[in-house]
Amino acid sequence: MTNLISAEGLKKLCDEYDYLWKVERPKVVRGVADAAAEGDRSENAEYIYGKKRLREIDRKLKHLGSRLKVLKVATVPANPRQATFGCWISYEEESGEERCYQLVGPDEIDVSIGRISIDSPVGQALMHKKVDDEVTVLKPGGESTLYITAISATRPLL
C-alpha cells in the first residue's frame, strides 16, 4: 500500500482524527456514563449502543493514528510531463469513451469525484506514461487499451 498523500488529504485525515478524539469520543463516553448510571446495563439499549459506538470510534482512531505516522505528503509538479502522483490523466478507451482521473493514494480514493489509487490496475498502468502513449490495462473484464490524451497538475475543465 502506498504511503503518499496530498497536503489537502493529510489535513482532512488530521481533522477527522481530531474531531473523533476531541468531540465525538467524549460525547459518546458521557452518554455511556449516563446510561450506566441508570442501573441495569444488560437491558439498557443506550448503554449497549454507546459501548458499540465507542469501540467503532476507537478502532477508527487506531487506524487513522497508524496511517498518519507513515504518510508522506507528495507534491505535484507544476507542468508534469508524465503521469505521477496527484496528476490528472485524461485518456480515451478503445470504445471511444473519454475519462479523466487524478492519481492519488489509498487514503484519498473517491471515484465519484475522479480520484483513483496509484495502486489500482489502471493507476499502475498510467504511472510514468506520457501524452500519446497507449497503455494496456488488465481489468476484471479483460484487457483494455487506453490512449493518454492529456496530463495536468490541475483538474481539466470538461
Image: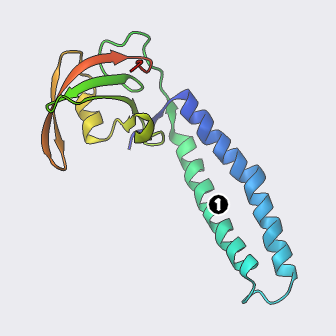
Residue occupying image coordinates x 38% and y 44% = 1
The image shows a total of numbered marks equal to 1
Residue occupying image coordinates x 31% and y 12% = 81
Q: In the image, is 47 to the left or to the right of 67?
A: right
Residue occupying image coordinates x 42% and y 25% = 86
Q: In the image, is 137 to the left or to the right of 110?
A: left
Q: List x then y, in percent, for residue 44.
A: 75, 84
Q: Secondary structure at mark 1?
A: helix
Q: Is residue 13 above or below residue 29?
A: above
| Nearest to the observer: residue 10 or residue 116 | 116
Q: Is residue 28 above or below residue 83?
A: below
Q: In the image, is 9 to the left or to the right of 115?
A: right
| Nearest to the observer: residue 45 or residue 39 | 45
Q: Which residue is mark 1?
A: 57
The quarter of the picture where residue 78 lies is top left
Q: List x then y, in percent, for residue 40.
A: 80, 90
| Nearest to the observer: residue 62 or residue 80 | 80
Q: List x then y, in percent, for residue 22.
A: 77, 50
Q: List x then y, in percent, for residue 19.
A: 71, 47
Q: In the image, is 59 to the left or to the right of 133?
A: right
Quadrant of the frame with the C terminus: top left
Amino acid carrying mark 1 in the image: Ile
